[in-house]
Amino acid sequence: QIALLVGFISVNNSPWTNYSAYSYFQIVTMCDLVMILFFYIIHIFRVYRKLTCVSWPLAEFLHYLIGTILLLIASIVAASKSYNLTGLVAGATFGFLATILCVLSMWSSYKVSCVTQSTSKYH
């Protein structure tokens, strides 16, 4: 997600007024990016076919749910502590944008898995 990366860079390159708030924002955005890359790699190399002991749709859904909630909290904290500094406001804005994109991704992923499961029962 490009919005996560842009938000991270914006917060990293601006003067900080509250170290703990912005370091929390950076940690959340980097963890979300790493986990998104992890699931992309799993899908690209089709690791989910070999590791059948893990429910991959459930794991991906929980990742998006927890990551989205943490990203929303981090964006709210960053926005409340920005004090009209443009880089921090931009970082919080991209954080909110990434939150919306994560919700859409979670919704579309859940919708696709439910539709494919429901149609595969009847065929």
Image: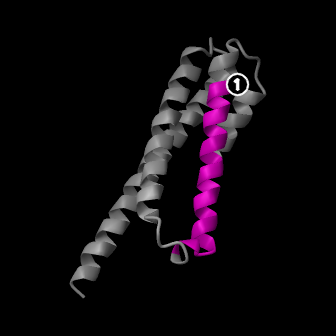
Identify the magenta region.
Answer: 23-48
Closer to the camera in the image, 98 or 49: 49
Residue drawn at point x = 63 percent, y = 42 percent:
31
Q: Amino acid at mark 1?
A: Gly
Say above or below: 15 vs 123. above
Residue drawn at point x = 69 percent, y = 35 percent:
8
Q: Is residue 111 magenta?
A: no
Can you give x and y, in whole percent of width and height, for residue 95 in the image?
57, 35
Residue drawn at point x = 53 percent, y = 35 percent:
71
Residue hosting label 1: 87
Can you give x and y, in whole percent of width and height, for residue 37 in the image?
64, 57
Q: Quadrant of residue 46?
A: bottom right
Say above or below: 35 vs 7. below
Q: Is residue 117 left or right of residue 58?
A: left
- Predominant secondary structure, magenta span: helix
Q: Is residue 103 left or right of residue 96?
A: left
Say above or below: 15 vs 34. above
Q: Is residue 1 visible?
A: no
Can you give x and y, in whole percent of width and height, for residue 97 in the image?
52, 39
Closer to the camera in the image, 95 or 74: 74
Residue drawn at point x = 48 percent, y = 32 percent:
72
Q: Which residue appears farthest toward the front when viewing the image?
A: 53
Count of picture labels: 1
